[in-house]
Image (spheres, coloured by chain):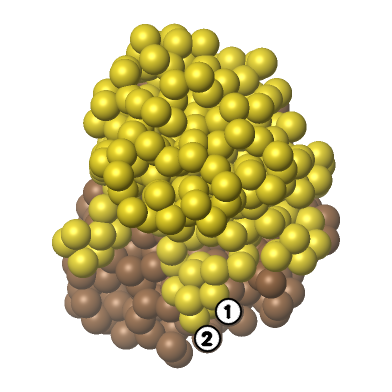
Chain colours: A brown, B yellow
C-alpha cells in the first residue's frame, strides 16, 4: 500500500520504518524536501523522502506525525483538502506545548487536533489512534507485556477498518483495540497525554508502558 | 477516626456510607445545614449531618465530594484555611461542567482543582485520589474484576499515608495504588476524566470499569 508519513521526528521515523518492514511503499515528508533526517532515513530504508506534498501525492494512507503545533500548516503545504480527498489520515499527534516549561495543551477541551484536521480537510477520512503510547510501543506493542489497550476513533468506518488492520499488522491483538466511536472521542485520547506524562515521570522516565481498560 | 464529607451527591453518599461501614465517625456537610438528602442519609446510617463547617469541625480527614464548580466556596463556608489547618483533605472531585451540553473542564491545563484547594488552604494537606472511577468503584473496587490501578498525588507524605490506608480499607490492593508524586500530578488525574467519559460512552453507559497501568 502506498503511504505517506508527515514528520521526521522519533514518531515519524518509528512508524515509517515499521511500514517499510511490512512491505509498504513509504514516502517520508518534511517541510523542506531536502530535510537531511528524512533523506538519511530514506537512504537507510530504501524508501523515499520529499516534501509534505510529495508524501501525500499518490498515497492511500497518510500518517500525521508532525508536532501538533505545525500539523495544520503541514497539510496546507501538502495541498490541503484537494490533495487529501478520499485518503485515510491517521493522526497520531498530541497537541502539546512545553515552551513555557510545563505541559500545556494547544487545543481547547471542547475540540481536538483530530477534529481540527477533519474540519480543515473535510474530504479526508481522519482516524485518531496510537497517540496514547510512546513511539516504540506504537509499532511494537509487545514491548509492554500482557494485555493493554489501544484506542481508535473516527467518523469513517472504512478508514477505521484500514487503520485497525494496520494496527494488527503492527502487532496489536484484535482484543486490544477499543473503538471509542466518532472523531470527537479524540478529545479523550488527546487529554490522556497529561496523565501519560505523569505516569512517565512517576516511572522514572521509562517509556514502555500503557494502560489496559478493565470492565466488570 | 473522625471524618467530614462535603457533598451530598452520589459520590459523597457512597464515600460517607463506606466510611461509616468501616466504623468511622462521619459528618456529611452541605451548604444548607438542613439539607434533606444529608439529613436522610444521616438518619439511615446513624451518622451526623450539618453545614460544611459542621463537617470540618473536629474532623481529622475531610473528603471533598462537592461539584468542583462549588468546591472553593464550600471550603470558604467551612471556615477556610484556619478550619482546615493540619487536616487531610482528600479531593475526589472532577472539575467538569456539562452546562453547555458538552464536557468542559473548569480548570486550565496548567492547574488542577486539587492545586487550587492546596493554594487556597495552604495549611491543609491535600491528597488527590479516587476521581478516576465511578462512585461505586471508588469504595468497592472489587466491582471491576482483576487488577486495576488507583492513582494518588499530594505534597504531604503523612497525609498520603493516611489516604493509602483508607484506600486499602475500601478494598484497593496495595499493588493497585500508584503514587504519582506531588499535587501537580493531579493535572493528569483530572484530565483523564475526558477519556473516562469516552470509555463510559463506548461501553454503553456501563460505569464499572477502570484502567490498569501495565509496565514493561
Residue holding disc 2: A161
Q: Position of residue A128 (x, y in %)?
A: 44, 67
Q: Residue A181, how many percent across, how many down?
A: 43, 78
Q: Residue A58 at x, y = what percent?
A: 38, 78
Q: CA distance from mark 2 to mark 1?
A: 5 Å
Q: Nearer the viewer, residue A141 or A19?
A: A141
Residue B110, picture quadrant: top left
Callouts 2 and 1 close, C-beta under 8 Å: yes
In the rendered image, which quarter is residue A166 located in? bottom right
As drawn, the residue found furthest toward the bottom would be: A158
| Residue at image coords 80%, 62% | B146
Q: Which residue is mark 1?
A: A164
Chain at numbered mark 2: A
Splitting the image into 4 quarters, where does residue A150 fall? Answer: bottom right
Q: Is disc 1 surrounded by few (<14), some (14 to 19) or many (20+) residues within 10 Å?
A: many
What residue lies at 61% left-to-right and 81% top-to-bottom? A165
**For mark 2, does the 10 Å Cα neighbourhood hold few (<14), some (14 to 19), or many (20 or more) residues?**
few
Residue at (35% x, 26% y) in the render: B53
Chain to which the residue tagged by mark 1 belongs: A
Name above or below for residue A215 compared with residue B124.
Answer: below
Amino acid at each position: 500500500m502506498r503511504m505517506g508519513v508527515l514528520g521526521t521526528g522519533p514518531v515519524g521515523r518509528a512508524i515509517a520504518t515499521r511500514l517499510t518492514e511490512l512491505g509498504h511503499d513509504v514516502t517520508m515528508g518534511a517541510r523542506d524536501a531536502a530535510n537531511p533526517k528524512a533523506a538519511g532515513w530514506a537512504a537507510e530504508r530504501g524508501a523515499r523522502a520529499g516534501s509534505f506534498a510529495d508524501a501525500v501525492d499518490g498515497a492511500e494512507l497518510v500518517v500525521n506525525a508532525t508536532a501538533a503545533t505545525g500539523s495544520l500548516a503541514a497539510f496546507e503545504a501538502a495541498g490541503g483538502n484537494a490533495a487529501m480527498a478520499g485518503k485515510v489520515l491517521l493522526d497520531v499527534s498530541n497537541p502539546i506545548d512545553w515552551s513555557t516549561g510545563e505541559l500545556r495543551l494547544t487545543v481547547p477541551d471542547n475540540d481536538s487536533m483530530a477534529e481540527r484536521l477533519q474540519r480543515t480537510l473535510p474530504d479526508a477520512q481522519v482516524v485518531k489512534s496510537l497517540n496514547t503510547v510512546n513511539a516504540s510501543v506504537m509499532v511494537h506493542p509487545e514491548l509492554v507485556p500482557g494485555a493493554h489497550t489501544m484506542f481508535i476513533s473516527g467518523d469513517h468506518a472504512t478508514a477505521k477498518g484500514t487503520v485497525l488492520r494496520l494496527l494488527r499488522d503492527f502487532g496489536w491483538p484484535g482484543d486490544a483495540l477499543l473503538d471509542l466511536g466518532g472523531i470527537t472521542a479524540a478529545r479523550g485520547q488527546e487529554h490522556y497525554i497529561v496523565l501519560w506524562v505523569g505516569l512517565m515521570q512517576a516511572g522514572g522516565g521509562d517509556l514502555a508502558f500503557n494502560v489496559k481498560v478493565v470492565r466488570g
